Amino acid sequence: MTMRTLPAGTARGARAAERAACRSLAASAGFDVELFDLLTCTDPDHLPEYVRVVELEGRLVALALVVPRRVRIAGVPVESAVLTPVAVDPGFRGRGLEEVLLGDTVAFVRSRGFRLAVFRGGVPLDARPDVVPCLGSYSTTFSPSAVGRLPGMDGASWEPLSQADLSRVVALYDAATAGTPCSVVRPAEPWVWLSRRGGTEFHVLRRGPDVVGYVRVEAPRGSRGAGTLRLSEVGAEPQEALVEVLRWAAGRAAASGLARVEFTGPPDHPFSRLARLRASARVTVGPAYDGGVSVTNRGLLLADIAVALAARAEAAGLEEGTQVVLDVGPKRMRLTFAGGRVRLVGGRAGSEAGVPVTRLSPQAFTLMVTGRAGGAEAGMLPGTVVAAEHRQALAALFPASYPQWVPAPYW
């Protein structure tokens, strides 16, 4: 059986009374049941229809979770949805259910007004032409011995994260990820930060009564993680606190007999830059295998980030009245910079005498708006025709960046 021969209407949202059946299906399909419980029971914002299911032969045979989250684009939190891998009953695999459920889930996300769908690992991205694999994988690696002797911060101490620290740690997290496209906004709620799943450790740096830094340490994963202290998050202010984090990481790795420290944040993160300056760190930018992104509501997304686009236009010195006309698929979006604002007007794509038009494929638009490819590189993307008159404005409005999925601590 394939997607084309499945009965119509088999993909839908789960009902509250079906929670036990959904949990049983998740377990049989190898889905992380602890994570399933966390996202469907502990999260106060969860709704039953956020579990998307396929029903065949009177039973639930496939499911995926829609996890509403605010995701940063151009530094602006936009309403988005994280989609988990599809779990399929072992007896129904190979029948096209993943494609059916992904199609339903993306349509659901779009209908609810979510601006982005962020796909996490295990999604067959090649089956979804509207999904771009643009969440980067990064590594900053250094030897503890390369750090050398660094003076400790006066009055500094390291302690495990406690509930009383959450508001300050969230502020440090926000400061560290504000410029990282596709990072998730986190609330200061204990269930988000203190679940301690998967061997994750959080440590906070205190100076007197104040929290001035924190690190997230991940448990080793397979042979690749052997001999490595793996930091997935670092947040610290002021700069001397960041240096203290470097000193602490090198000291912990050395004391544990580990040969390497690895930080998995993007290369433009302050800790990555510090490690290059003080520890001759090696930076690796890998393929975008961490997941993918689909822009499900382009107009709403651009409206959300219009203020940020205006700030970029002003900083780049764009002239008043600068206009960019983008045709993406059947839709047209006209952006005009005037009066310190970017005004957005939508319409249908098509020819218009005397008006320069830049044509982008949906994939190219996603790559550009998330920073995986900057506006200056738009002409190198497949399915694009860039008007010469738009090149300067596109480069200013959509700079290249390092999009990264920075998951909640429980993920």
Image (cartoon, helix red, strand yellow):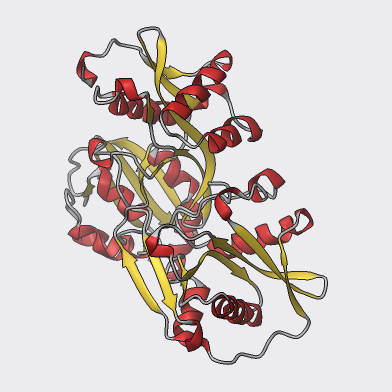
Q: Quadrant of residue 101?
A: top left
Say which of 73 and 41 sits in front: 41
Report the residue at 22% width, 45% height from top. 361
- Pick the front one: 387 or 155: 155
- Residue at (42, 18) in percent of width and height: 12
With 160 as the anchor, is 310 left or right in this view? left
Return the x and y of residue 114 as percentages of the image width and height.
47, 36
Residue 333 in percent (x, y) is at 33, 43
Q: Is residue 30 left or right of residue 329?
A: right
Residue ID at (41%, 56%): 337
Q: What residue is at 72 percent from the left and 61 percent from the top? A: 168
Task: Note whether residue 278 is visible.
Answer: no
Q: Taking 380 as reference, is 104 above or below it?
A: above
Q: Position of residue 41 (x, y in %)?
A: 63, 30
Residue 353 placed where, x, y %? 17, 44
Examine the rendered structure and indicate whether residue 121 appears above or below residue 173.
above
- Give the residue at the far right of this rendering: 209
Q: Quadrant of the N terminus?
A: top left
**Residue found at the very far top of the displayed protein:** 58
Can residue 325 be seen by looking at this rendering? yes
**In terms of depth relative to the viewer, which is nearer, 1 or 308?**
1
